[in-house]
Image: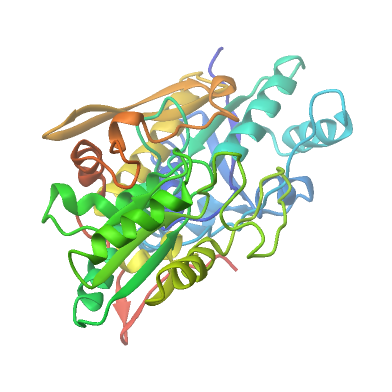
Amino acid sequence: MKKLIGNAVVGQSGGPTAAINATLAGVIRGVLENVGDGAIKTLYGMRNGVEGLLEERLVNLNELFADEKNIDMLEHTPAAALGSCRKKLPKAGENDAVYEKLLAIFKKYNIRYFFYIGGNDSMDTVAKLSAYTKGHDYEMCIMGVPKTIDNDLVVTDHTPGFGSAAKYIAVTMQEIIRDCAVYTTPAVTIVEIMGRDAGWLTAAAGIGLAANGIVPDLIYLPERAFNKEEFFEDVRAVLAKHPNVVIAVSEGIRFADGTYVCEGFGIASTDAFGHKQLSGTGKALEHAVKAELGCKVRSVELNISQRCGAHIASATDLAESVTVGRAAVKAASEGVTREMMIIVRDSTKPYTYHVDHSDVSKIANQIKEVPAEFINARANHITKECAEYLLPLIAGEGTPAYAQGLPQFFIID
């Protein structure tokens, strides 16, 4: 594709993370560093993703971030500063009016570059928009920019946003383990961690295997069928060794027949993409252990704090997020289109990586699970190899600036 001259639009979609704004900051930096001589003149931000774009709710990011201090603050601000959405675009041929409207908006604002920051469902949007524009007489560069705490996008080694969530979980588990160790009364603490289909976040609870040896007694991931009887055996075995059992479980663990452990204990619902909204896994197991063993049991659900804990973000994650955002702009300005940016790990010890890109149509709607070699034979913990793979991603502390004891965040009004 020849070099296109025009404007760009960037949006954020799906669940927020502590680093999604760092990726946005990278896109902004990439554009501002090349304004004038570059292919991109004005960068617009779409409020609430494609949902806001369809309503032409745009903000001029060149003007808003002319001050470097604002970009610095944005990098350490959790959640999606532009707002997010979970709007699912129709399949090609089902409702072309939506795509026709988007194309009309692109032409109206002379938008030649489209950057969409998000996870699997967002890449679905990028893939569909890419497929539609490919067959129409309007040249554009459309780029997927990854983010998701779930770390479930294929091809890329890991996703921006995951490292900070993993750090929050790893640190919180260290603190919970310390708290639970003070009593001699037999007790079981079950910590429920996000993860519908992939157990990467729950695996992060065991990062201590590669650091200080302090980890939960048991870890259960959705990649392996959950066996209730084996679970009770595992808990009894740990109680025989010490009085305080700490267990990490993915919200998405399910029985061999595919039934989620939490079903029947929480409120069943689905989102716009047809995904079950899971809750109550920890509580379900709490009741089960209480009934079976009769000891003291409590459950803890980390919930959204996993994805918005900017006060303990991974410095490595934030730096990579900015780098990926910048690289997306560079690639697009050089004619790359219909691709998603990816992180390629070159080495784990020492940790090194580089950024590349890959066909988004081969990434969207695929799930990258925790591999077999990262899960122990009993399926009740992770391996040291897994912990060593995860450890570099949580390195460093990317804390925001504070004023009067509270963090300073950048808010787009």
Residue at the (38%, 63%) spot, across then down: 73
How far from the left and from the top, in percent, is residue 306?
42, 61
Instruction: Give x and y (percent) for residue 280.
Output: 56, 64
**Left or right side of 119 for 393:** left
Front one among 288 and 408: 288
The percent coordinates of residue 229 (x first, y second) are: 44, 52
| Camera-nearest residue between 43 and 255 | 255
- Count of marks overlaid on the render: 0
Classify residue 102 by image quadrant.
top right
Q: Is residue 37 visible?
A: no
Residue under the image location 42 percent in, 36 percent down: 34
Q: Is residue 385 left or right of residue 39?
A: left
**Residue 330, percent from left and from top:** 42, 29
Query: In what quadrant of the picture does the C terminus appear?
Result: bottom right
Q: Is residue 313 above or below residue 42?
A: below
The answer to whether residue 282 of the structure is visible from this angle is yes
